Image (cartoon, rainbow, N blue to C red):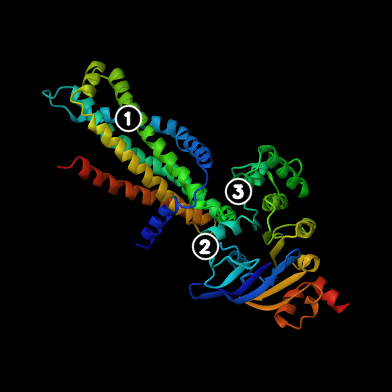
Amino acid sequence: MKDLGKYFIFLGNLFVNRESFRTYYRLTVEECILIGINSIMLFALVSTFMGAVTTVQTAFNLIAPYIPKYVISQVVREMAVLELAPTIMAIIYAGKVGSSMAGNLGTMRITEQVDALEVMGINSISYLVLPKVVASLLMYPLLVILSIVCALAGGYIVAYFASYITPTDYIYGLRYAFNPFTITFALTKSVVFAFLVSTISSFKGYNTQGGALEVGQSSTQAVTSSVIAILIADYLLAQLLLGA
Amino acid sequence: MIELQNISKSFGDRKILNNISGTFVKGKPNLIIGASGTGKSVLLKCIVEILEPDEGSVLYDRRNFTEGDKDLKVEIRREIGMLFQGGALFDSKTVEENVKFPLDMLAKLPRDEKYDRVNLCLNRVGLQNANNKMPSELSGGMKKRVGIARAIVNNPKYLFCDEPNSGLDPQTSILIDDLIADITYDYGTTTIVVTHDMNSVMGIGENIMFLYKGDKLWEGNKDEIVRSGVKELDDFVFANKVMIAMRDK
């Protein structure tokens, strides 16, 4: 509970004694490159294989002859949009970006770089963390969209090269009974998860005390706490937005 | 001038600083000395309020920093330059960007003037050609010198140095000490140096405060320190053979 209180105070400090818009703009662009551009390859690769494997496994399970083949791609679509792209990728995002944020801030803390900012009268939380949070909120939803596209493309590649489903059926299934709200739901989740990963990881990193060992521990804690928060938020959002 | 009024600080049950008072004068290097773990760095951090003292006040030219409002704190902080033990250079920035950083954040100067100031400060610390180097490419002494350049680039009224000689060879240590002393005399800054290096004490110690287990035991200058009559200080001062030989002469 004490940590939760500290976390909310930390969030409050993001918005006090801020620097100029120009400063944040420059830092946010730098963070967008670090967070977003540098994650594209990983996201594309993981999502493509996830889509391909989901297609194969769904086809393996749908053996009844009266179930039309296009149901396979319908299942792939729903899984990719509702869960695989926003949630599973959020866990990967926490592992890659969250641990990097915590490690970066933790190193700055133990090498007194954070103190150097404070001595200059700069709100170090706002200066260091706010650009990371904004960049995360901007980039993660885009990465989720990329992930959805790659997952569906992965399924199509399987449809094209294997014999589970024809490419025509696959495309038909993707378009069949499509509910656009699922995209809204996925993007809502992506914004919430981006906020949770960036703020929790930054909080853990910023409050590192000790040496190199503790920086490593902070990174691990950042990933663990982010993943737990993602799973809880995932259930709550599903219940709130999709529940009866 | 910086005045400390009854500064105390504890971490949990451990009392680190016990009712420390004293005055640090303008235009002279002021030293806080003592063995490791006596609370020197904690006192320095309390003075610049990286750590908040449990009791007592710090006055910067009669302005109460500890009890001041947010605007006063920001105003005073912007008059402070600090050299950290490890340099605390920003890893992702070049030497030039590190030194320019306080100007970018705190001063409203034309671009050219900023670069002139940066080059002037790098010249002052003897690093004319290091502008584009990254901190990872610098030696310990060079990092300290860049740290000094960053600390003085904004013409601070108050300069703080936390163990400026730690991890440096004797020659570089003397160079850093002389640099700090010259800056203090030339710009009339109120400088506080935390150190346990007796070479620094005997070289630049104009006004010295000795801490022992969180208490201030003695205050004086480098000429008085060898005949203080305080046992704990004598143990500290005459811990090395050079000082013992000097005393025996």
B163 vs A234: above or below: below
Q: Gap between marks 2 and 1, in whole Å?
A: 51 Å
Chain under numbered label 1: A
Amino acid bearing label 3: Leu
Residue A148 numbered tag: 1
The residue positioned 64% from the left and 46% from the top of the image is B103
**Mark 3 element type:** helix
Please provide percent x and percent y for residue B169. 76, 57
Image height check: is B69 above or below A192? below
Q: Nearer the viewer, mark 1 or mark 3?
A: 3
Gap in angstroms between the C-alphas marked 3 and 2? 19 Å
Of B59 and A91, nearer the camera is: B59
* Residue A7 in which image quadrant: bottom left
Q: Is residue A170 left or right of residue A101?
A: left
In the image as oriented, which residue stretches furthest toward the top? Answer: A168
Q: Compare residues B189 and A117 and report the one nearer the observer.
A: B189
Residue A103 visible in the shown view:
no
Residue wearing tag 2: B69
Q: Are marks 3 and 2 on the same chain?
A: yes
Which residue has dot 3 on it? Answer: B106
**Residue found at x 43% / y 44%:** A133
Query: Foreground: B107 or A102?
Result: B107
Given the image, on which type of amino acid does mark 2 rest? Asp
Secondary structure found at label 1: helix
- In the image, what residue type sits under mark 1? Ile
Corner quadrant of residue A171: top left
Q: Quadrant of the C terminus of chain B?
A: bottom right
Front tag of 2 and 1: 2
Residue visible at 54% across and 54% down in the picture: A109
